[in-house]
Amino acid sequence: MLNGYQFRLNPTKEQAQTLLRWIGCQRGIYNAKVSEDRYFRTFRNRALALTGVPIPTDQAYSHYITDQTAYFREVPSVILRNGAALFGQAYQRYFKGLGGRPAKKNHRSRQSVWLTSELFRFEPVAHRETGEIVEYKLFAGTKKFPVGELACKAHRLFNLPASIHISIRAGKWHVAFSAEDSTVPVFKEETIITELQRMNDDELHVVTIGADRGVAKPLMTSNGQAYDLSDIQKERIQQKRKRKVRWQRRAAKRQKGSKNQRKAYRKTARYQQYEANVRNDFAHQTSHQLVAHTDAKLIVLEDLKIKNMTKRPKPKQDANGTWLRNGVAAKAGLTRAILGSAWGQVADYTQYKALRAGKLLIKVAPQYSSQTCAKCGHVDAGNRPSQAEFLCLRCGHEDNADHNAARVIKQRGIIKIREYAPKGKKRQNCTSPN
Ligand SMILES: [Zn+2]
């Protein structure tokens, strides 16, 4: 299967400068393609009947290299070609409905450059005694534009990729790529589902685990296991948030576009990155624990529409055009908590890790899971006397609210597996025509 890899890079100052130039030029071509596309869509599209010339969809870029854009000549042409190719790929994604129409990138977008095999090579380094390959060295550049060896911590072994992305984020360089990893088995979803469906109810109950994603506790399973950041991590996140805000204020006061302002913004980025790293790490550890350290074969989560839940509320106006409160400030805290709990990442990581381990993650409808009694199924808002407690008004079942929800989610997962019918095949009815 394809596996994603990312390693830290430590380029020298000169190398970093070259890479930044490459990033800038590739983005320049990409943006030029976007502008050109916009131009043709607004003018030529309407005049197509008159001129008979269709909108160009090729990946030509040489017409952008003029005397005004001589800087394009200072980078390998493959860098430019790849910029045009990236635009083409973005358009393909758009046509497939996987993304928006390609838009211009700026200095706030992801700073990365796509290198194809002409521009880099990995060289294996063998162990002196055993002759085993222990690491890889990364070289970049061409004869005309050499970069040399990029110091890289390639701490895992991999099959060699056809292309790589080099990026800089909060002052740190990374190389990322995907490569075939033949050591990892991948199970088919259908096979696992069939296996699960063959089990009786008791067996299925044993191998299923439900997990509730919450704001107070990021994750609680039906086994009663809670997953959360450590106290130190939480404390540090608070600290870094404060510092981030402080440096944001400082940056705002400094002269626009000055070196000092840029320095201040770099600091805010670094403080922000810390939190993102901790959350990402939490998501990886939690998903690993769920998959590797439970007996569960079926993991059930709620199908939360995280994008909608964290969307900025639309501005509201009354009939006279006066702006009304739209709750944006009130929602901001919740949004931060949701994104901070890494709900999306936990689900994504669990999904692929489960498939590698012959397990399955499914998502079920989230409606009223927090108000439903796990014991008798009674649904009532009054079942929740407080945020943390659950007390059923019908049967008196008492539980921690998150744990109760996790059990409800688990039950829904079992029902979903029972009802699941493979695509294209209709589930057989009890009464057969013969
Ligand atoms: Zn009940």
Image: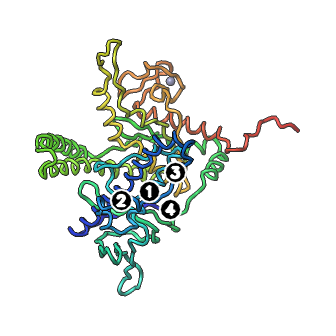
Number of other residues with Cα within 10 Å of mark 3, as a class: few under 14, some 14 to 19, many 20 or more: some
The Cα–Cα distance between marks 4 and 2, rounded to whole angstroms, is: 26 Å
Task: Give the residue at the far top of this rendering.
Answer: 320
Mark 3 residue element: helix
Mark 2 residue element: helix
Ranked by sequence position, the earlier of labels 4 and 2 is: 4
| Mark 3 residue type | Gln
Ranked by sequence position, the earlier of labels 3 and 4 is: 4
Along the viewing direction, whichever of 296 and 333 lies nearer the viewer: 333
Along the viewing direction, whichever of 323 and 245 lies nearer the viewer: 323
Are circles 3 and 4 on residues that touch, CB within 8 Å?
Answer: no
**Residue 137 x %, y %:** 35, 75
- Asked if residue 150 shows in the view, the reply is yes
Image quarter of the C terminus = top right
Mark 4 residue element: strand
User: Disc number at residue 26?
Assistant: 2
**Residue 172 x %, y %:** 26, 59
- Asked if residue 5 shows in the view, the reply is no
Number of other residues with Cα within 10 Å of mark 4, as a class: few under 14, some 14 to 19, many 20 or more: few
Are circles 4 and 2 on residues that touch, CB within 8 Å?
Answer: no
User: Disc number at residue 92?
Assistant: 3
Where does label 4 land, which residue?
Answer: 2
Tell us which disc is closer to us: 1 or 4. 1
Quadrant in the rendering for residue 178: bottom left
Number of other residues with Cα within 10 Å of mark 1, as a class: few under 14, some 14 to 19, many 20 or more: many
| Mark 4 residue type | Leu
- Give the side of residue 22 with respect to residue 309, left or right: left
Where does label 1 land, which residue?
Answer: 86
**Residue 121 x %, y %:** 39, 74
